[in-house]
Amino acid sequence: MTETRFDGLFELNPQTVRCPYATYSRAREEAPVWVERLNAFVVTRYDDVVSVLRDAVTYSSAMASGPASVTPLARRMSDDPEASDTLRAHVERRLEISRSAVLLNADPPLHVRQRKLVNKGFTARRIATLEPEVHTISNDLIDTFLGDGRVDLVRQFAVKLPMTVIANILGVPESMMETFKWWSDSFTVGTGNLNLTNDELEDMFSAVDQFYDYFTGQVTDRRTRPRDDLLTDLVHARLDGEEPLTLNEILQMLVQFLVAGNETTTNLLAAVMHTLVTDPGLMARVRHDHTEIRALVEEVLRLESPVQGLFRTATTDVEIGGTVIPAGSLLWLVYGSANRDRSAYPAGDDLDLEGALSRQHLAFGKGEHFCLGAPLARMEARIGVETLLSKLADIRLDCAPHDVKYLPNFVLHGLKALPLTFHKVV
């Protein structure tokens, strides 16, 4: 396989980013392939992806977010002779904090210790207590545009619902919502984008630094004035025989909760509604029976995975699908491809609600690093869609289908906007 097969994806060609699945399908016909542009092997088959995810020893998560995420970019900028003194100070702080590998980037046994310490904040019981709040937020957001007859569902709902929920969980006041969103965008702007300019990097690291300043103060506050929020849980988490979380560990966890709580759930919500408005038969079916929403969410997670794939690093020479992978090599595990592999999912590229709740897709990963926030994302998507369908009728796309634009990102897969028209349910 030649590198040109992935050129459109990594160069962020809008049509390829919108629908990378033909690229993935062709890639699954052959073994994992080295791609110079990504500086990684691309792994697309279900069995190969799962074999890596199940082996946290042979495949390290140290660079799980990939070569264009914040820490690798900080390393690159620290060696750039043209970087300003301000930028250097920002990246040095990031590098210092990132020396504490955390959850997504941590390997056993460190990952096991951290997971034990934070599990309390993500239990089924804790998530269930949030359902009334998510209902209230969903209704309040819809009421802001209900009389307009049209909405950009991404900007006015899909962004704001999960952002408000995670902000409340972390104790961030409503007055800081715009700043909170800016921080979230800044942590993800490089992930899945290999083409950032120095000006974009300056803005990104400035936001990152402000995030650290704010939450360092909040951690200090929670040590003496605990509240009923996740940040307090992290600060005071204790287990027999385990060291408490350090400040740097907490800051890194907050970054991951921020991104997972905002970007990925936003993309999921928008994808579910886009799927419905482009399939009238499916819309009618789900309107008739809201219990189908759970299955629909699972199928959209499989078919339009908000995170198209994460990375691992081989700790020793290995062979995957007939390809020899040298020790130290980076691998991009393409969940978005594995989730459509007919060897694991007979429906392949087709949406199939039957049995969707029993199928185990890879949108949240698998094994030791399965996403902590998966129950929260599922609950927000279910309630958000249910509330939209309860209050909005005759929902239609307010642009030509080919004019729907996607984020310029090959890792985070989501809509930039979703313009809709509708009538109020009477």
Image: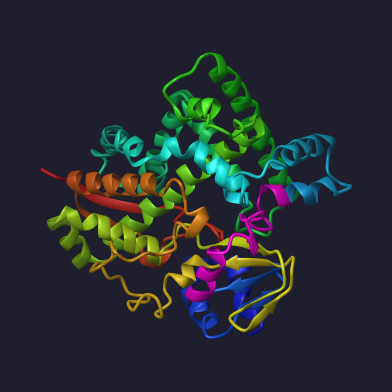
Q: Position of residue 401 (x, y in %)?
A: 36, 66
In this picture, is 234 found above or below 304? above
- Quadrant where the N terminus sits is bottom right
Classify 423 as above or below 317: above
Q: Is 150 placed left or right of 366 in the picture?
A: left
Asked which colour scheme the image uses, the reply is: rainbow
Position in image of residue 377 (x %, y %)? 38, 47
Q: Is residue 199 magenta?
A: no
Q: Residue furthest right?
A: 81
Residue drawn at (46%, 23%), measured in percent from left and top?
173
Residue 291 falls left or right of residue 114: left
Q: Residue furthest top?
A: 224
* Left or right of 275 on screen, residue 411: right
- Total count of labels: 0
Q: Is residue 189 visible?
A: no
Residue 59 colored magenta?
Answer: yes
Horizontal side, residue 202 vs residue 412: left or right: right
Please identify the residue farthest to the left as the structure is shown.
426
Does the image show residue 227? yes
Looking at the picture, tell me which residue is in the foreground, 207 or 46: 46
Q: Picture coordinates of residue 208 (x, y %)?
A: 65, 37
In this rendering, the answer to whether 101 lies above or below 16 is: above
Q: Residue at x 68, y 41 (%)?
A: 100
Write the residue at 75% across / 41% down: 95
* Residue 299 position within the rendered picture, expressed as x and y whole percent measured from the top left: 33, 64
The image quadrant where one finds the C terminus is top left
Closer to the camera in the image, 312 or 65: 312
Region in magenta: 46-72
Is residue 48 depicted above or below 271 in this figure?
below
